[in-house]
Amino acid sequence: MGNAIGFSVKEVLPQEAWSELVSCQSTILVDVRTKQEWESVGVPELTALGKSAIFIEWQEYPLMSYNPLFVKRLVEELETKPTNKIFFICRSGIRSREAAEVFSGYLNDLGMRVECVNVAEGFEGNIKKEKSDGFSNGWKARGLAWRQYQ
């Protein structure tokens, strides 16, 4: 699965994504990290908003090969959740940007207009210079709702 070059994907900070998830019921968050990341680091918590994130690996652990069923699985999830905006999140915003670009290209090929938005900084963000100090930004460091994955 390659990158859909040429498809514009907007990028927002975690707080902006949260704000839109709060204010617009039809917005969706897709977490593209690996199951191992969800289990060890936690996941965004959206139940207070009456929502839940969609969890689909963009790359599969341990080889980090592209998940050939990513688009198919996301399409299946969206059949029951009409939306005009999808936020994509990973650890730092790199994999999620690629997933958003590919999915945006897929939708564009179908003539569908759904805005795909990358969450810059991701769930964990950048590691501080002193690794023992944790992360300098990202969903968790900015104090947004999260929980351990079950």
Image: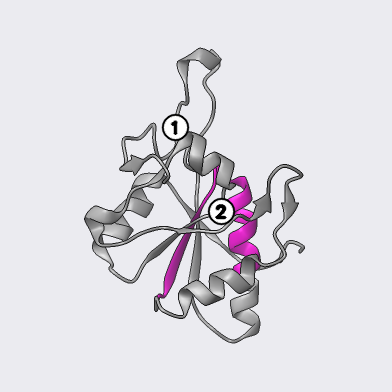
- The magenta span reads 83-103
Q: Secondary structure at mark 1?
A: loop
Task: Name the mark nearer the viewer: 2 or 1.
Answer: 2
Q: How is the image coloured?
A: one colour
Total number of numbered discs in the rendering: 2
**In the drawing, what numbered circle is on residue 32?**
2
Q: Secondary structure at mark 2?
A: loop
Which three-letter amino acid code belongs to the residue tagged 2? Answer: Val
Does 38 sit left or right of 94 as displayed?
left
* 79, above or below 98, in the image: below
Q: Position of residue 36 (x, y in %)?
A: 57, 41
Q: Position of residue 80 (x, y in %)?
A: 41, 79
> Residues at badges 2 and 1 in contact (C-beta under 8 Å)?
no
**In the drawing, what numbered circle is on residue 34?**
none
Q: Is residue 46 visible?
A: yes
Residue at position x 32%, y 41% in the image: 144
Query: Is residue 95 within the magenta segment?
Result: yes
Residue at position x 50%, y 35% in the image: 40
* 131, above or below 42, in the image: above
| Residue at mark 1 | 137
Residue at position x 65%, y 73% in the image: 105
Does 141 sit left or right of 48 as displayed?
right
Which three-letter amino acid code belongs to the residue tagged 1? Answer: Asn
Q: Nearer the viewer, residue 6 or 122?
A: 122
N-terminal-most mark, 2 or 1: 2
* 33, above or below 4, in the image: above
Query: Is residue 84 within the magenta segment?
Result: yes
